[in-house]
Structures are given as structure tokens and as C-alpha cells.
Image (cartoon, rainbow, N blue to C red):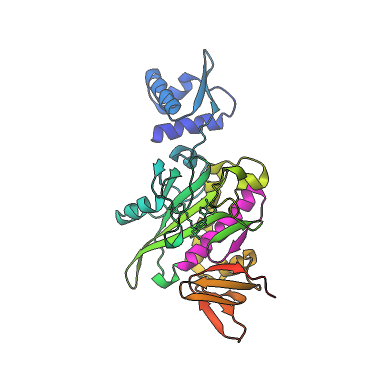
């Protein structure tokens, strides 16, 4: 609620200092009893508050959650993340976001959960989303571009996430076309873009982002322990997920504004600077078979260009790629 938000802002601004009950009731324009009730609500949400007679209250510990309150506080965007739909456990944030998009929620609405029980990757693959250690979220956008341009948003998101990770952790991740973000060759982030559209018009694009943040290497299940990593495993430090998300929102917002105004050009250039596979020999496994050759770059539409050994240039729209060991 707005009151909760004002209250948290007061505590945040006063840092370590106590805020008196009187000051709170003046600021919120409510009785001391009502103040006490709001404080109790915060405690229920997981905030640890210390109360000292004649001094007032202060926050000694925040919940390790990515709740609406944690995300709104200090958020600098105009649109992205201004409306947050938070849940402790969901099957998949994509599912909820699809529903909300259909109901017509504002552009930039974010669905986030502490845990997903059926997190999804591409082609109905599983995305492991354990409780409290990652960022599992879906962002709803309504770009005024033709449906065939939607894949560009996956690449835009990848660039934004790379930049945010750099800013928050100092790590420089790399992008593997189309949607993986790797650190030292292991997957730390997956992006899944889905859309609701007619033949000629996008209604909404749902961008799902999964980030391994605070898992330790031994936390990964056998199925992915050799291919996955997390930001904490790489830096040796726990990362504040809310801060990371706010940074991602800001990066996506500024790239998205650029994209709507000037098109894909700048984003394509940025994407190529972060991509590992461009200029390398790769194997692209598509549903129709594998193609081996040199990754030449991406087109304006985000399609991967691979030149095979006969010199034929292939346009790859969807595939899993791996670096080839043949030179
Ligand atoms: P993808 O199909 O490219 O990758 C899925 C593959 O990645 C799996 O088959 C598995 O090998 C591996 N994998 C699964 N979980 C993890 C993990 N936590 N870390 C590293 N590797 C893993 C990538 O699909 C797109 C993922 C999007 C996930 C987000 S989370 C929020 C939103 N909700 C939802 O259900 N999906 C998206």
C-alpha cells in the first residue's frame, strides 16, 4: 500500500537512526495506534524492526525477498517495474504474465516469484527455479512493432541483463545466441520471449528472465550442475536480488526507448560486442537437423547467419548452438 511504501521510505532515508512514533504518525497523518498496526504489518512481511522507548523504531533487518516493497523502494524507472505482481510460489511467472497481459495491465508490469514449481525454458524444457536464490520474473511489454520483430526483444533483454550484471557484480558475462548468458562458459541466465499477437500486430510480449543469483555450486541439481553457475558462485558474495532487478529494469527501459525510437541498430551492435559465438566455428542444432560452419553475425531481425563449408549462408531462426572443436 502507499502507506507502507511511505513508511519504508522514511526508514530507508533515516538509515541507522530511529524514527519516532510521533514523527511517523505526523507524516502518515494517522494515530499512534495505526502506526503500531503498520509496524506489525511490516513485521509480518519479514522486516525486523527494533522499538526503543522514547527513541522510536528502526529497521535492523530486511526480508530476503523480492517483494513489491523491496522493488519499488528507490526504483528509478518510469514504466518497467512500476507495477509488480509478487508471489511466493507459482508454477511459472510466464503463465501469470500471460493472463495479466490479456486482462490489459499496464506496459512494464512485472510478475516475480520466490520459487517456480514448473519454470519453463524453450521447447517446453525445464527451468530450475529454487526458492529464494534466483530472479524468476516475467515482464510485459507492448511494443508497436510487427510480430516478426519480436525476437529482437530477446536480444535487447540479453544486452540489458549483461549490462546490469556488470554494473552490480563487476562480472562481464557473455551471450550465446539467442538467449543464454554465460559466465566462464556456464549458464547463469536464461531468457524466454513469448507473445500474444495477430498476424500483423503484437498485443503483448512476455519476456521471461531466469537468473541464478545466490545458489552455491553444490546447490545445483545433478541435471545441471556441470552446465550452470550463479552470480554468487562466481563472485563469492551474496547479491541483493532487488537491486539487481531494479538495475535490469532501468537498462531494459533505456534500451527499449532507444529501440522504439531508432530501431534495432544500436542494440545489434551492443549485442555483437557481448556475443561469444560470432566469428567462431559452431554447430547449430535445429529441429530439422544440424548445421556446422562459421557464425558470421546476426541480421537486423536477430537471425543468426552461419556459413557452411560449401560457402552456403544459412539463416537460423531457432536452434541450440555449441562451439565446434574442429578448426
Ligand atoms: P532454454 O530452453 O534455452 O534452457 C533450458 C535448459 O537450460 C534446460 O534444458 C537445462 O539444461 C538448463 N537449465 C535449466 N534450469 C537451469 C538453471 N537454473 N540454470 C542453468 N541452466 C538451467 C532458457 O531456456 C529460458 C529460461 C527462462 C526462465 C524464466 S524464469 C521466469 C520465466 N518463467 C518461466 O517459466 N520461464 C521464464
Please indicate whether residue 297 sits to the left or right of residue 202 in the image.
right
Residue 1 image position (x, y, % from top left)? 38, 35
Which span of residues is magenta-colored? 151-178
Residue farthest to the left, as pictured: 103
Q: Does the stretch in magenta take in 177?
A: yes
Q: Main secondary structure of the magenta part?
A: helix
Residue at 63% in and 63% down: 274
Residue 19 image position (x, y, % from top left)? 52, 23
Q: Which quadrant, please, contains the C terminus?
A: bottom right
Residue 321 vertical position relative to residue 161 in the rendered view, above or below: below
Residue farthest to the top, as pictured: 53
Residue 111 image position (x, y, % from top left)? 41, 48
Quarter of the image for residue 194 reads bottom left
Q: Does the stretch in magenta take in 161?
A: yes
Residue 312 vertical position relative to residue 244 in the rendered view, above or below: below
Residue at 46% in and 51% down: 78
Amino acid at each position: 500500500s502507499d502507506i507502507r511504501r511511505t513508511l519504508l521510505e522514511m526508514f530507508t532515508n533515516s538509515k541507522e537512526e530511529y524514527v519516532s512514533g510521533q514523527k511517523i504518525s505526523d507524516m502518515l497523518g494517522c494515530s499512534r495506534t495505526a502506526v503500531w498496526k503498520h509496524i506489525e504489518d511490516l513485521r509480518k512481511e519479514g522486516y525486523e524492526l527494533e522499538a526503543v522507548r522514547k527513541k522510536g523504531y528502526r529497521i535492523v533487518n530486511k526480508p530476503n525477498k523480492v517483494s513489491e516493497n523491496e522493488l519499488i523502494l528507490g526504483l528509478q524507472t518510469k514504466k518497467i517495474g512500476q507495477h509488480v505482481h509478487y508471489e511466493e510460489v507459482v508454477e511459472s511467472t510466464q503463465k501469470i504474465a500471460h493472463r495479466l497481459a490479456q486482462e490489459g495491465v499496464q506496459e512494464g508490469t512485472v510478475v516475480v516469484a520466490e520459487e517456480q514449481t514448473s519454470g519453463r525454458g524453450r521447447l517446453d524444457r525445464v527451468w530450475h527455479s529454487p526458492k529464494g536464490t534466483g530472479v524468476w520474473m516475467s515482464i510485459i511489454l507492448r511494443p508497436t512493432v510487427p510480430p516478426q520483430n519480436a525476437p529482437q526483444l530477446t536480444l535487447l533483454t540479453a544486452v540489458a541483463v549483461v549490462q546490469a550484471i556488470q554494473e552490480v557484480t563487476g562480472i562481464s558475462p557473455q551471450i550465446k545466441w539467442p538467449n543464454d548468458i554465460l559466465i566462464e562458459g556456464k549458464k547463469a541466465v536464461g531468457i524466454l520471449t513469448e507473445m500474444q499477437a495477430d498476424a500483423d500486430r503484437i498485443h503483448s510480449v512476455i519476456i521471461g528472465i531466469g537468473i541464478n543469483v545466490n545458489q552455491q555450486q553444490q546447490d545445483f541439481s545433478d541435471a545441471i550442475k556441470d552446465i550452470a553457475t550463479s552470480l554468487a558462485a562466481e563472485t563469492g558474495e551474496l547479491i541483493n536480488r532487488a537491486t539487481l532487478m531494479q538495475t535490469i529494469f532501468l537498462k531494459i527501459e533505456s534500451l527499449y526507448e532507444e529501440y522504439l525510437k531508432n530501431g534495432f541498430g544500436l542494440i545489434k551492435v551492443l549485442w555483437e560486442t557481448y556475443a561469444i559465438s560470432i566469428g567462431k566455428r559452431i554447430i547449430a542444432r535445429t529441429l530439422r537437423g544440424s548445421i556446422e560452419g562459421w557464425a558470421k553475425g546476426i541480421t537486423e531481425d536477430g537471425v543468426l547467419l552461419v556459413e557452411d563449408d560449401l560457402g552456403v549462408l544459412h539463416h537460423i531462426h531457432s536452434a541450440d548452438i555449441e562451439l565446434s572443436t574442429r578448426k
